[in-house]
Each structure stands twice: as C-alpha cells, then as structure tokens.
Amino acid sequence: MKKHNFSPGPAILPAEVMEQAAQACVEFNNSGLSILEISHRSALFTPVLAEAEELVREMTGLGDEYGVIFLSGGASTQFFMAPMNLIDPEDTALYVDTGAWSSKAIKEAKAFGKVEVLASSKADNYNYIPKDYSVSNHAKYLHITSNNTIFGTQQHWWPQTSLPIVADMSSDMFSRPLDWDRFGLIYAGAQKNLGPAGVTLVIVRKDLLGTVQRHLPSMLDYRLHIENESTYNTPPVFPIYVMMLTLRWIKANGGLNAMEAHNRKKAALLYNEIDRNPLFAGTVKHEEDRSLMNVTFVGASEEVDSLFLKAAKEAGCVDIKGHRSVGGFRASIYNAMSEESIQVLVDVMQDFARKHG
Ligand SMILES: *Cc1c(COP(=O)(O)O)cnc(C)c1O
C-alpha cells in the first residue's frame, strides 16, 4: 500500500532523489565505486560539493561576501556555534522565543554572551508568533526561528532592523523565496526539507566572523570551514550528495517561487478542511501565523484523537501524530509532499466526519 509520509523529520524526499541516491550507493557516476566509499577530496566528490554550493548561491543570489558550508552536528550544534563565533561575553544577542527550538537556542547562547529575549509566546504554548516588539541596535544580532516545527507557526514577515538576522531555517529552508541578504547567518539541519539527517547547511556573512576574542576550537570555527570549502575534516559525503540532488530537484521544478506557490496551495487544501470539518480545529491562534510546512490540529474529543489516528494509518498516512507538547495531529508537508497525498488525508478527514460527526 502506498504510504503518505507526513513525518516531521527525517522527512519525505522526492522519489527521484531517493532513486538516484540508491543508485549512487551501488555505483556512482559509472565509476565502478559507490558514493559511500569514495574520498571527500576525490575528483568524483569535489564536483558534488561545488554544485551543491553553486545551487545554494543560485537560489539565494548570495555572492562571495557569504560563506556556504556543509557541517555536521545538526542544527543543535548551531545553537551554540553561532553565538560562540559572533559574540563576546560583554556583547548582547537578541532572541525571539517562538518555540522549543528557539528556547534551546536561547539556553545555549547564554553561555557566550548576554542574551535578551525580546518576546515570547511561551505562556500560550507558543500558539502564535509575537509581533509587537522593537529591535534596538545595541546588540550584535537578532535570532529568529523561521518555522516552528512542533507548534505549526511560521514567520511570514521579518522585523525591521539594521542588525544581522541569524535564522534557524531547519524546517522551511528553500520552501520559499526570501530577501536572503537580510540575514547574517542562516542554518538548517537537512533532514526536514533538504536531505537526509547528517548534514547542516550554513550560510554566513564573512564580515561577521573573526571578531570574537575567545579561542575557537578548529571544528567550531566557521572561518576554517569556509577557507577549506567544507573539507577541513571529512564532511558527511553521502548526505551532502543527497542534498545536492534535492537542490537540483528544486531547481528543475521551478525554483523557490514554484516551491512557495505549490506549498501555499497544499497548505490551503489542508487548512480549509480543518476549518470546515466540525471534528477538527487548528491549534494556531492567528491564521496569519500558520505554517506552510507543519500543519497542527486537534480532534474535537479524545475519542476523535485516538480513532482518527487509526483511520489515517489505515489509509497509508503515516506519522501524523502531534508532538506531545501540542497533542492531536501534525501533518508535515514539506516541499516533496504531493497535493495527491494531502488530498488522501483530507478524504480521510471527510470520511471520518461522515462516520463520527
Ligand atoms: C529539527 C529542528 C532542530 C534540531 O535539529 P537537529 O538537526 O536534530 O539538531 C532545530 N531547529 C528546528 C527549527 C528544527 O525543526
């Protein structure tokens, strides 16, 4: 039976990407070798790394004033690596607390400088994106989580500020076009929207680096990774290859404008059903904050919650159980999710309402 994969992450990837990745594990580019057994400095892999970087630059339009690197350690390593590279103990960094990931980023940053939390929606279980705050210029950067994977909210606007914005884009990277040059540093763990687990994409403005006084361990110094074009040590070769294939797929399917249009259409399909169906309700307080990537909703009763999970599973919809801190359901509908799969879920919801409504 066809599975419709609504997993929050590691998450759905385009079928053709997985087929190409599988083939490369058997034999890569007619080389007689598997992608899994070649040197990261080989003539086979160097073009992969170069193409991945080139595609990132093409999609963002960012030039040489930014470094584009592929690291390991996940977005969670970036929670401390970013402040470690950007602020000294007497410096201030501003954070907006929009969810569990923001709050982890805040916790880590406190070890490296002064952290000011400008706004938080924690008291309302992060069910909205705070908007009424102003950003003063005394800080080194402003940190924002662009999409709150657990709570189903997304940043659809960016605050006015001359400060560099540091953004955790793990769960909506390359789902839409942005004014990329407003950001000082962007990081994204690959496993939500870009590839398999094991690689983290980092884009950083070079002029922000090299200003801190502390000693940086080599592996935690962005400059070294930029200078060595992500091969200071052995990078995650296979995850980088799959990310490159995914970036190619994005480009071949119309680029970021087309991704956004498709993502909007897909999300609307599901949100319309949630709003229409008397047995379900969205969990995000303000419609304008709803995520196009992670659609969170709850059933009208505990009975609905447990029965619907079963009905969805029977239709092949996997991993729609909500995070324990929100409950109910979460349908993660990243770039690679098709409209057809969302329609299957919508059909289950309609069928469920007929039977149980
Ligand atoms: C999943 C996620 C993380 C954590 O990523 P790891 O790669 O597991 O460290 C951080 N931020 C956001 C927004 C996420 O969705």
Image (cartoon, helix red, strand yellow):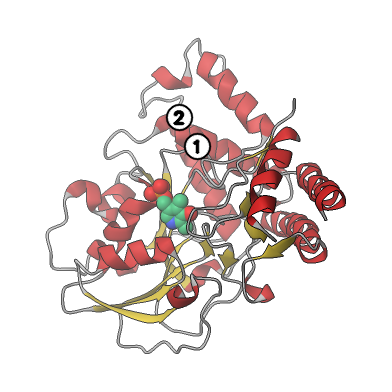
The answer to whether residue 230 of the structure is visible from this angle is yes
Left or right: where 266 falls relative to 121: right
Is 41 placed left or right of 325 in the picture?
left
Q: In this view, does 158 lie above or below 346?
A: below
Residue positioned 63% across, 32% down in the render: 17
Residue pointed to by mark 1: 196
Amino acid on which the number 2 mark rests in the picture: Phe
Image mark for residue 205: none
Q: Is residue 316 visible?
A: no
Residue 93 in the image: x percent, y percent? Answer: 30, 76
Q: Is mark 1 on a helix, strand or loop?
A: loop
Residue 41 appears in which quarter of the rendering? top left
Asked if residue 82 is positioned above or below residue 289 in the image, the reply reads: above
- Mark 1 sits near ligand 1, with its Cβ under 8 Å away: no
What residue is disc 2 on? 238
Disc 2 under 8 Å from ligand 1? The reply is: no
Binning the other alpha carbons within 10 Å of mark 1 as few (below 14), some (14 to 19) or many (20 upward) gives: many
At 16% from the left and 51% from the top, the residue drawn is 217
Residue 198 picture location, percent across and down = 41, 38
- Amino acid type, label 1: Pro
Image point 56% across, 74% down: which residue? Answer: 128
Q: Nearer the viewer, residue 69 or 301?
A: 301
**Residue 208 placement (x, y as % from top left):** 31, 69
**What is the tally of numbered marks visible in this picture?**
2
Q: Which of 172 and 346 is in front in this view?
A: 346
